[in-house]
Image (cartoon, helix red, strand yellow):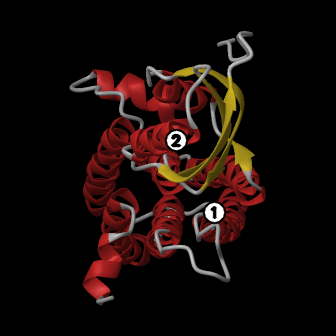
Amino acid sequence: MSLLAFLKRGNKSSGIAAVGNTALAIAKGVAAAISGSGAMFATTLHSVADALNQGFVFFGSAISEKEATKRFPSGFGRVVNLFVLIAVIVISIMAYETIHKGWDLIVHPHESSDLWLNIIIMILAILTDGGVLVKAMKEIAHETKSGAKGFSVFTTSFKNVRLAAPPTRLVFYEDIIATFGALLALISIILAHLTGFYFLDGVGTILIGFLLVGIAIKIGYENTLGLIGVAAPKEIEDRVADTILSDPDVVDIKDMRILQEGRKYHIESYIELKAGLSLAIADDIIYRVRDKLFKDPDVGDVRMGILETDNITTWKRD
């Protein structure tokens, strides 16, 4: 496989975010070195962390799309969760450095120079991170098949983010913090300049550090569950059940288990068919139902057994 084909497999949101945050980190780093602003330094570290994280996750998501092998028959879906956990370690280190810098600025406050340079860079950061956040919201709407458009993408993304792929969730959460953090840094820089209370620069820096801690805990928890192996959300289970029961020869679902690995779902199910069908016809029905399920790009594997109906309805929606 060529490098270009490999990269095309990666999560689009994390790839775009990695490029955008690399550019932002460079711009913020230059501004922080010139002005000495603690809040600018904090958001520089944040952008560095985001760029590293999303770069890790982009390559991890590409690897997770690799086909199953004899040695790894379940595929590589959980690899992306491992890469996201590595990203969480980076976020945690950056959070510590940010809080440490903020405390130092509170204890030893000093005036920052080049106010307008800081303001311009912060506005650029808000626009860039905000743009990446909007892209992540659209990706969530696409991955969850919500069909949302326009302003409804905003509300739908918050509602359905838990159903999105791990890399998309990472970009979504990180860029909420990045956008809010840049806004917080801008306010801190302006207030410190206008009031002369230069310790406010440190307060803003520490707040950004705590935001990083919060996002590290949130993302770390979710991806630890994914690495262990977690049941698919109820919405996915209902969607799969509706697809199975839409076949005219399927009368019930006796049992079903759906395991989520990365953004792929592995389905195991026993279905009940109409009474009196021959084995050959029953085989045809299994393949027909499997083909319907595989039309969903998020379905990675289907294992299905058949039973003759016992005329008792087992599968019911909660």
Spot occupied by residue 31 in the image (x, y as percentages of width and height): 35, 71
Determine which quarter of the picture holds residue 5.
bottom left
Please state which amino acid type lies under the numbered disc 2. Ile
| Res 303 seen here | yes
Near-viewer residue (249 or 277):
277
The residue furthest left is 150
The residue furthest bottom is 2
Please state which amino acid type lies under the numbered disc 1. Asn
Q: Is residue 30 left or right of residue 206?
A: left
**Which residue corresponds to the image point at 71% horizontal and 55% vertical from the top-left?**
220
Indicate the quadrant containing the N terminus: top left, top right, bottom left or bottom right.
bottom left
Residue hosting label 1: 81
The image shows residue 186, relative to residue 99, as above or below, that is: above
Please give the label number shown on residue 286: 2
**Labels in figure, total:** 2
Spot occupied by residue 21 in the image (x, y as percentages of width and height): 37, 66
Indicate the quadrant containing the C terminus: top left, top right, bottom left or bottom right.
top right
Spot occupied by residue 105 in the image (x, y as percentages of width and height): 64, 62
Q: Is residue 195 left or right of residue 110?
A: left
The residue tagged with tag 2: helix, strand or loop? helix
